[in-house]
Amino acid sequence: MQPAARPPLNFSESGYLTVLYLVGYYKTMIKICNSCHNEFKIRPSRCNQKYCSQRCFAESRKKGKNIICHTCGKKIYKRNSDLKKSKSGFYFCSKTCLITWSNTQRKGEKHPNFISGQASYNKRAKEEYGEKCANGEKCPLSHLILPSYMYEVDHIDGNHKNNHIENLKVLCVWCHRQKHWG
């Protein structure tokens, strides 16, 4: 037995396309999926079904937005609750992209721990005075060639928040320990 000719498509009052036709011995309805807008066939007993698959049903439940990663430009989906959490207003597809962006934003004076160059006083003092002990010939290690990690920066007035170059001097580890623990 051949299936009946397909009647013209028409929408019901609820907005769903419903068409009944016989396929073999079964009545079948044709509906249009609310998510993907493709036609699908169902039995009349399932007339309340609105989606052609579980995937379409899951897609229809999403309330967030598709946005673009600020670093790499990849298209990503974010829930509304995640969209509200962003302090910077930028969104990222992964922690790698977040850290890449964060590292460019948190340098020098933009770093949250930066207080008048506090994070870089060690480097500035060694560039200004060189890597040699400020005690000169009084230093017991002055005749040795020491690696750079053996030199430390001392705060002359003892205030570790005063990082002006005039308040800093470079000492070898021996002299620095002698000054503080004497």
Image (tube, rainbow, N blue to C red):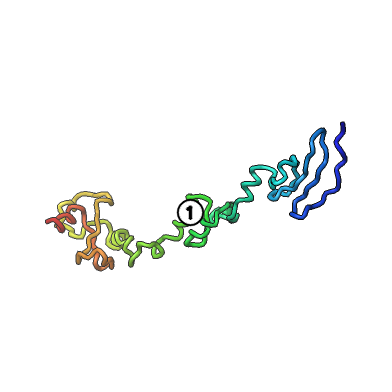
Q: Position of residue 82 (x, y in %)?
A: 51, 56
Q: Quadrant of residue 25?
A: top right
Q: Where is residue 92 in the image (x, y as percent from the top left)?
A: 52, 54
Q: In which quarter of the image is the C terminus?
A: bottom left
Please state the total of marks drawn on the protein image: 1
In this view, which residue lies farthest toward the top? Answer: 1
In this picture, is 10 found above or below 110? above
Q: In this view, does 70 lie above or below 43?
A: below
Tell me the quarter of the picture where residue 121 sits: bottom left
Q: Where is mark 1, residue-wise?
A: 98
Name the outermost residue toward the front: 45
Q: Tell me where residue 27 sits by quadrant.
A: top right
21 lies left or right of 123:
right
Please name whichever residue, 113 or 82, is drawn nearer the observer in this view of the structure. Answer: 82
x, y percent for residue 5: 88, 40
Given residues 121 and 114, the one toward you in this image is 114
User: Label 1 neighbourhood size at 10 Å, few (<14), some (14-19), many (20+)?
Assistant: some
49 on left or right of 157: right
- Residue 90 lies left or right of residue 19; in this view the side is left
Residue at x 87%, y 31% (from the top left corner): 1
Label 1 element class = helix
Q: Residue at coordinates 60% horizontally, 52% vertically from top-left?
A: 62
The structure residue drawn at horizontal position 48% and vertical position 50%, both measured from the top left corner, is: 95
Question: Which residue: 42% across, 60% down?
Answer: 106
* Picture coordinates of residue 142, whole percent (x, y): 18, 53
Residue type of the residue flagged with mark 1: Leu
Q: Nearer the viewer, residue 49 or 161?
A: 49
